[in-house]
Amino acid sequence: MASPLVSDVAHSGLTVADLDDALELWCAGLGFTLERTFTLDADVTAATTGVQEAVIRAATVTLGPHRIELLQYDPPRTPESAGSPAMLGTVHIALTVADIDRALELCAAYGWRPVGAPHRMTEGARAGTRIIYLEGVLGGFLELIAPPQLR
């Protein structure tokens, strides 16, 4: 049964050391198709993920209905920064939601805390979309993605 709040698993994300090497593995090696590449500046990175003073080079690759987002943080984070979505090897699950504020309230009731405030993308393929990362009380990260409502 479909949820009225969550409509889709948008993607799974993986933080990698080198985006170019990761793309070689996922596309040439594993047979995924490159969907798009993009860069998030330090302000968008901080607003979305809570990671300060970092730029993200990223790519989305697909295989059938599955979408993987590969993220390279610059500068990279060291093991001392455990608990950060920028830590190499960190995985997150992104959910497409109809109401980001309602989803935040629901997740908070289960111990998930936002790492910042929802950020509205102002340009590119996701212009108008609100995005926020949440950290679980026992670790792990969720990303909530609320596309602009069609009016």
Image (spheres, rainbow, N blue to C red):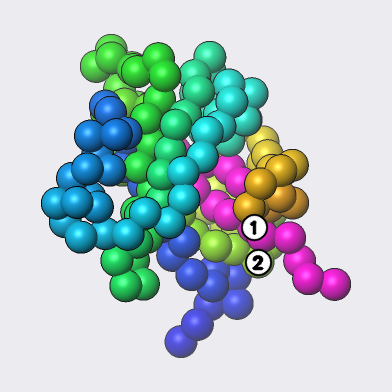
Q: Which residues are magenta?
A: 131-151
Q: Residue at x 47, y 29 (%)?
A: 56
Could you say which is closer to the camera, residue 95 or residue 55? 55
Q: Which residue is mark 2?
A: 98
Which residue is at the far right? 151
Q: Residue at x 73, y 60 (%)?
A: 148
Name the amino acid, label 2: Ala
- Tell me, yes or no, whether the two marked residues, 1 and 2, touch with CB atoms within 8 Å: yes
Q: Quadrant of residue 78?
A: top left
Q: Which residue is mark 1?
A: 146
Label 1, residues with CA under 10 Å away: few <14, some 14-19, many ≥20: many
Could you say which is closer to the camera, residue 47 or residue 18? 18
Q: Residue at x 58, y 21 (%)?
A: 42
Residue 135 higher or lower than 88, as above or below:
below
Residue 52 location, x and y as percent? Answer: 53, 17
Does dot 2 land on a helix, a strand or a loop?
Answer: loop
First in sequence: mark 1 or mark 2? 2
Total marks shown come to 2
